[in-house]
Amino acid sequence: MKYNRKEFLKIAGKFVLIGGFAKILKANKLFAAVAGKPVNKEYDIKSNLWGYGIDISKCIGCGRCVDACKKENNVPKEPFFFRTWVERYGILENGEVKVDSPNGGLNGFTDKYKDEKLVKKYFVPKICNHCEHPPCVQVCPVGATYTTPDGVTLVDRKYCIGCRYCIQACPYGARYLHPKLHVADKCSLCYHRITKGLLPACVEVCPVKARIVGNLKDPNSEIKKFLNANDIQVLKPHLGTKPKIYYKGMDKEIF
């Protein structure tokens, strides 16, 4: 197919425009609005790398973290929409594993397993794993899902087209399509809070300090102390996503 000079310049101009738009889009993401609140412009993004720890041995399944997250981030009140949730694992004598999470653990776990052969029970909080190699970022066709220089995976609602590719790609089931906004939504580590020196809502309300967040570049941070003092695991390490959500006390039954 042949093009004259005018047609060629018109086509080339479109590609230049697209490339320029992509660069502007990438730059704007450094100070993208999260949950309607701007990132603190005085925050030193290059000096931070956020990591998050969960001590399974401490979690009591109270659900306060789930409730705080919903309120702080305007997560839909309807069931099955969560940025963080808590799962209950029950191990039977025969090795069978029972897992449940009624309403995401929002109201705690007041009922008991009926099976009398239960030998072990524990609670496991789950959130977006803010992976070093996030599959969700790779599949997003418009760049709405991205990773900040300080290691947090975010969704820019202004650009998300609600295609659900990222939801399907996430191996941790940490994303959902917002029923009213029709965009992908998930845990942001309360980016609008941590960039202002505050704790994520879920960490702040935990009565037993089962959740820890901090700067992985700071050797004196709580998260670094947590990692150095404990035997740490991550979810689905074989996938190579390199999660930055670190668990203490993870049994082989957890998935």
Image: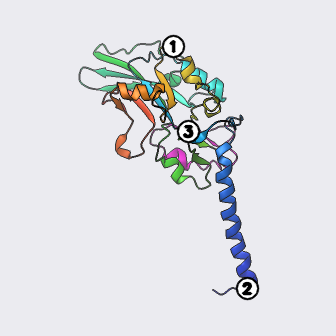
Q: Is residue 230 magenta?
A: no
In the foreground, 55 or 94: 55
Spot the residue most to the right.
6
| Residue 185 sits in quarter | top right
What percent of the width, then of the height, locates residue 113? 38, 15
Q: How many marks?
A: 3
3D distance between C-alphas at marks 1 and 2: 69 Å
Amino acid type at circle 3 is Ser
**What's the residue at 42%, 45% (across, down)?**
241
Q: Which residues are magenta?
A: 157-185
Task: Please give the residue where the numbered disc 3 appears in the rendered image.
Answer: 47
Q: Position of residue 119 (x, y in %)?
A: 28, 16
Tag 3 and tag 1, C-beta contact below 8 Å:
no
The image shows residue 9 at horizontal and vertical percentages of 73, 78
The residue where tag 2 is placed is 5
Which comes before the other along the chain, label 3 or label 1? Answer: 3
Q: Amino acid at mark 1?
A: Pro
Q: Looking at this view, is 196 or 127 the one in front?
A: 196
Please rate how many residues cluster around mark 1, counting C-alpha atoms within 10 Å: few if below 14, some from 14 to 19, many from 20. some
Q: Earlier in the sequence, mark 1 or mark 2?
A: 2
Look at the picture and state if 14 lies above or below 35.
below
Q: Position of residue 66 (x, y in %)?
A: 55, 23
Tell me the SS state at disc 2.
Answer: helix
Secondary structure, mark 1, is: loop
How dense is the environment of label 3, judged by Cα within 10 Å: few (below 14), some, or many (20 and up)? few
Q: Is residue 6 visible?
A: yes
Q: Main secondary structure of the magenta part?
A: loop
- Tag shown at residue 207: 1
Residue closest to the eye, 218 or 65 = 218
- The image quadrant that residue 204 belongs to is top right
The CA span between labels 3 and 2 is: 49 Å
